[in-house]
């Protein structure tokens, strides 16, 4: 069940990587590699940092196959995939909620305290997109537009890490913690909430 | 013997990193760091991901010295080095064949299945160039021009991983698997074969 | 004592990351993430490469809190922070000296020889700034302007690694080795010393 959810999340993230590659006119290698990096990158960073190597995302062929298929599908059918952007966006929000909570719980299980586990949960959710944007030659979107993406991810991961620290069973934590991330994202989208940007001051250098 | 081949591969990769740095008008630090990152980056990523730390590329001073020398030579003699581009390109092809096969075998030895070992073999071969391009502020070339580079690397790595899985001795695998990568690259260059790029469809966003 | 010095170094590095983010008009997520990446990135790379995982910079909440605070302070007070650039630059030089020496000693302690330990010490000092620049979409400044930054860092790290190899106590090594890095930087700044850039030759490709 969790494996299936995980693979669905990877598939959706990978499609977003493939679409960025297609729109940058990359070739098939670029499309597939960006799909893989976006789908697997966050989890691989987390696992390398906490010493859980080799990461399942590398050692298990199912984790490799899913983003490759997503990349090839995007390569071949990108106009149709592009028209589904609303649906993909929705799935991406669910993937984010799942990844950041699962990432926080995995870090907590391996002995990290709640603050580091929350941070690594957020990294699991947003790391793939950061790598995607670096490989595509652009400043990561999550840093730029004030869109509420990383902050809801951190909130869900922090809730999960805190509950796990208090001894709540992981199976009980997953749904409500992911719901915090997902609900905040959906509400922010609908109501136009934004993260703050620096006030313009007098020129400072 | 393998060590020598490995160091020659690192030297040639490092020169390609140094040349990119010189052409971007970087200073001597940039030239040497790009040479090191290009020569050693793929192997270091592979070793960190499979948990073979510290990587020989970091722990063994010979692996550090070779790309530093390559960087300094490129810094000092770049017009001459640049005129040798045809020769360097040929050596680079041989380095690619060697690296992706050796990378796949090392991953397989550490217990990974054939698909992950093949993927990590390809990463060993192409990872340095990707880091080089990111540090030089450009989208990795292997994603852009449809040049057949990563795909032959994956083919050689996949053949090596499959044969190793079947129990064939590593010493027997090296030459034919590397020959697949090298031969495909050379043929593709001569005949102008290209990897596909996305078909332009109707605007998709 | 060392912990305090370390946290001060992280704070100052993090401010430089936050200022780059503010000047690139990133939002609060970008400012805080760049602050964290700049303050912690060098140490995390070193620890991952030598297998000291999870890195203290991730596992210890104090290491996470300091750059977050630095990022938020920079976000809120960036005009004032920007006016302090001379002071920040001075602290940054001290942070560099401390980080590259401490990094080299940690690598040496974990069994690396003097050349690898020196290289990893330099990476500890300059790695955060490289990640900062990649995330901000620019070629790392330490590669570009011939400013003497990485070379003094390497010199201090190399001295520390050599003395440690000879059996000198770490407590004795720290101050003189850091002084080499710091003194060289300060002198270079004052006297306008620059690292060499490639001579322009005839067009080479």
Image: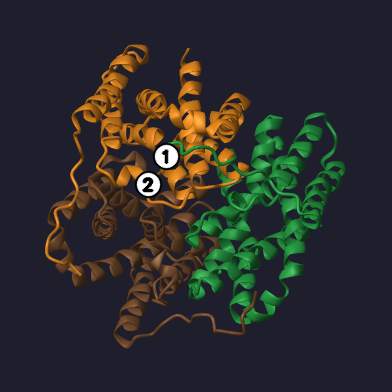
Chain colours: A brown, B orange, C green
Instruction: Indicate the secondary structure of the residue bearing disc 2.
Output: loop
Residue B162 seen anywhere in this rendered image of the structure: no
From the viewer's perspective, is A65 left or right of C42? left
Q: Residue at x 85, y 38 (%)?
A: C169
Q: Residues within 10 Å of mark 1 (few under 14, many from 20)?
A: many
The residue depicted at 32 percent of the width and 21 percent of the height is B178
Which of disc 1 and disc 2 is earlier in sequence?
Answer: 1
Q: Are marks 2 and 1 on the same chain?
A: yes
Q: Are marks 2 and 1 in contact (CB under 8 Å)?
A: yes
Q: Is residue A195 visible?
A: yes
* B151 relative to C175, above or below: above
In the structure shown, which secondary structural element does the residue marked by tag 1 occupy? helix
Q: CA distance from mark 2 to mark 1?
A: 7 Å
Front one among C130 and A108:
C130
In terms of image quadrants, where is residue B172?
top left
Residue occupied by mark 1: B129
Q: Chain of mark 2?
A: B
* Image height of B50 relative to A130, above or below: above
Viewer-nearest residue: A101 or A84? A84
Residue A72 in picture, x, y percent from top left: 18, 49
Residue in the picture at 26% in, 54% down = A7
Question: Looking at the figure, which quarter contains the C terminus of chain A?
Answer: bottom right
| C8 is higher (above) or lower (below) than B190 | below
Q: Would you name the residue on which mark 2 appears?
A: B140
């Amino acid at each position: 069940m969790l494996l299936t959810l995980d693979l669905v999340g990877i598939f959706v993230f990978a499609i977003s990587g493939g679409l960025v590659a297609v729109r940058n006119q990359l070739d098939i290698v670029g499309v597939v590699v960006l799909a893989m990096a976006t789908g697997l990158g966050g989890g691989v960073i987390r696992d390398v940092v906490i010493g859980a190597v080799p990461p399942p995302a590398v050692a298990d062929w199912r984790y490799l196959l899913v983003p490759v298929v997503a990349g090839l599908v995007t390569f071949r059918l990108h106009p149709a995939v592009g028209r589904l952007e609303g649906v993909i966006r929705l799935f991406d929000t669910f993937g984010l909620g799942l990844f950041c909570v699962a990432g926080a719980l995995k870090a907590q299980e391996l002995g990290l305290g709640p603050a580091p586990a929350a941070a690594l949960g957020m990294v699991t959710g947003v790391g793939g997109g950061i790598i995607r944007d670096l490989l595509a030659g652009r400043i990561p979107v999550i840093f730029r537009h004030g869109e509420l993406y990383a902050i809801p991810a951190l909130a869900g991961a922090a809730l999960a890490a805190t509950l796990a620290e208090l001894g709540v069973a992981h199976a009980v934590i997953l749904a409500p913690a992911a719901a915090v991330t997902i609900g905040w994202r959906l509400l922010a989208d609908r109501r136009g909430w934004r993260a703050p940007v620096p006030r313009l001051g007098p020129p400072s250098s």
